[in-house]
Image (tube, coloured by chain):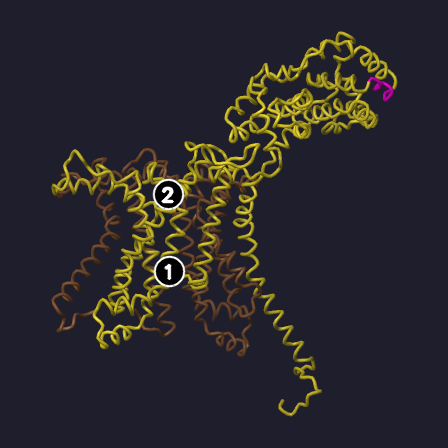
Chain colours: A yellow, B brown
Amino acid sequence: MSDTTSDQVLTTQDGKPLKAALARALRREKLRSFLLIAPLLIFVLITFVAPIIDMLFRSVENEIVSETLPRTVVVLEEWDEASGQAPGEDVYNALLYDLIIAVENKRHTQLGTRLNYEQTGLSSMFRRTGRRVDDFGEVYADQLIDLNAAWKEPVTWATMLATPEWISAQETWAANPSGPEPAFVVSEAARNALPTTADLYGAFARFIQTEDSDSPMEEDPWVPVYKALYQDLIANPDAASAFSGETATLVGQAAAAAPNFETVSIKELFIDADDDWGSAENWAVIKTFAPKFTSGYFLSAADAQLTPTGVELKPEDERIYLYLFYRTLLLSIMITVSCLLLGYPIAFLLAALPLRYSNLLLILVLLPFWTSLLVRTSAWKVLLQQQGVINDFLVWIGIIADANRLVMINNQTGTIIAMTHILLPFMILPLYSVMKTISPSYVRAAKSLGANDWTAFWRVYFPQSIPGIGAGAILVFILSIGYYITPELVGGTSGIFISNRIAFHISSSLNWGLAAALGTLLLVAVLLLFMVYDRIVGIDNVKLG
Amino acid sequence: MSALPPYASPLQKTWHYSFRVICGLIFFFLIFPIMVIVPLSFNAQDFFTFTPAMLALDPAGYSLKHYNDFFTNPDWQQALRNSVMIAPAATILATFLGTLAAIGLSQSHVPYKSAIMAILISPMIVPLIISAAGMYFFYSRIGLQGTYWGVVLAHAALGTPFVIITVTATLVGFDKSLVRAAASMGADPVTTFFKVQMPLIIPGVVSGALFAFITSFDEVVVGLFLGSASQQTLPWQMFTGLREQISPTILAVASLMVAISIALLTVLELLRRRSERLRGLTPG
């Protein structure tokens, strides 16, 4: 090809330009490698990465307040929490409508639990009120029914508020019921004339149809629907003009009578059900946690709280997480240091011995590495107990008296001893692989130049083993700050880690948001450390066994 | 280090021997806890320490009753069955997907290689409790929480990084000209893979599979959150046993698991020797 001139294009045997052919081959190679990787990549993304992202999202997610109390949250915007007064009647009206829907759907207790994380007492407030809210506004129902018995009939309500299309579709369905009833549709005219009633009744009809599989034509509306109608009639005395026929007469009659109705304050009903509804402080909490996203869980994870006036640290006696993070960090450092102190001589010995012996001794390191974590933890439980092997031995040789056996388990000592044992191979293996590469001639050269053993080790050998120390220490540290099983079993209360608290919030206290926030903080710490590890060792160079 | 020179000073001699003693003690620390449970599991009493009868080597002090309990107790048997059902399924899935991906990653032109590698390795890096929390939330959303397949998928995801690492390590030493040689002699890619590539990387695949197996077999945190009572595995049963009603049967189970790890370790060691021999390295 040396005789080709510059204006000639290099071609392959079958006449295609060489450049294009090479590009095509490269493309094909890339595609092939990608097709090989894709199944696992998709698998890991779905089974592992998506859950982690979901958890990150959950740590800031706070839709429950605005989803459960949508109307209240909007009206509450107007309220000024600085006034120190509970909100006005309009907020309580909105709360009544939200709460009756929430209670029927059994969601108010979840909301109470969520708000209880921020202010104790709110859970019982929602639960107690939930039992009584279904007859709030009964006085309006009674008066409307007294005025005209037609208001007692479910059909009256359904025909007043539904579209004519739905009514005829419902009739056809009722004549020959097959499948579910057509979904209730609120008419535009009714929505304009009686907005609150239409809104609440729409929710009622949806609930009756989907949850109870019943027909709004046959079920009595919730009592607060009557209150909603009264409110609409007062706001719009001319509502009857939007309707026709019998309904118009009925609505007109009610609108004329409404101003003379005996009234009741919904606010007082709520405060009567639970005094806490009158507290401006509680309303401030609801308002503070109304947004769809919250930093509340992260603040809790850092022992702070979001108050209406801003972020502040929790009272001294309620701070636990900062201390727990600190303890996790401190214990992890202690475990890492003990692993290093115990692992360095072993790695040094293994690297110095001839391969025949070192391979044999390596098995003593690999056996614990391959032994089940639970096995090693139970072994330590057996050894460290007060009636365990070590204490028995010490008593037997007479070092300690039978009466004051050492307490070595269910405290920090237990965690440190057991975890040092469990993580020691993770320190020895990277140290060993680095020390194996250190040529003995450097130390010999140092000695021949007059260095004594210590100087030769400290000035020549040790600096070369630092990459191994870095790799091993970071690995052990990363593994230990996320440990759960061993601290749970041998740590008692003083030797537990942040992971144990995360597990507690997932399975016992069910405060998932806080668990997710704590997990996110831990994850960030581990990922930062891992980036350092990647710099020092490189992920591709992780060696196993 | 290996041998003490004849001219060593007394101080050097002292240090030489005391260093060996220190190392011996550390080895003792590593091995003793694992070994001590084996004799204890033959205890005739329900104690977690050596009884006087055991120390006197009196045969009456020893019995197989804890092993008997393990093999007859329905709870332990169910746990054993679950472990045997879950771990192999997770291993097969992890090994298959992991090997394919490792081969893909070892090609010379892989776009975004380091980003892909980071994602694929992440299940090994992220603390188990976080993986467990995330999977618990997510799998309950999609209805996999508390199911057999939920646990298998989670365990497989946790096992794949090990497969990738071990297979990649064997592929690093793989001579690409062997593939070209096979192709030049008319072998199609599939034949080349099975006849040339596969026999050379099989030690990596097997040790990766062993890692994946032990990851799943020994896993308890994710199982604890993702599984329901009917997916209770051996480590899970041990965990609850250690936390609540500590029973010496745990020691019998632990001893059996030590035997399993010794078997796995032996297989791995044999594989390592084989692979070193194949590559013409000096046998260890």
Residue A444 position, x and y percent, is 24, 75
Amino acid of disc 2: Arg
- Under circle 2, the secondary element is helix
Q: Which mark is residue A80?
A: none
Q: Residue A108 appears in which quarter of the rendering? A: top right
Q: Quadrant of the C terminus of chain A?
A: bottom left
Q: Residue B270 appears in which quarter of the rendering? A: bottom left
Q: Quadrant of the N terminus of chain A?
A: bottom right
Residue annotated with mark 2: A327
Residue B89 appearing in the image: no
Q: Chain of mark 2?
A: A
Tell me the distance, in whole angstroms, between the alpha carbons under discs 1 and 2.
22 Å
Residue B130 appearing in the image: yes
Front-most of residues A479 and A514: A514
B18 to the left or right of B90:
left
Residue annotated with mark 1: A470
At horizontal 56% and vertical 20% (from top left) the residue drawn is A276
Is residue A203 highlighted in magenta? Answer: no
**Span highlighted in magenta in the image:** A237-243
**Neighbour tally class for label 2: few under 14, some 14-19, many 20 plus, Cα within 10 Å:** some
Residue A525 position, x and y percent, is 46, 50
Amino acid of disc 1: Gly
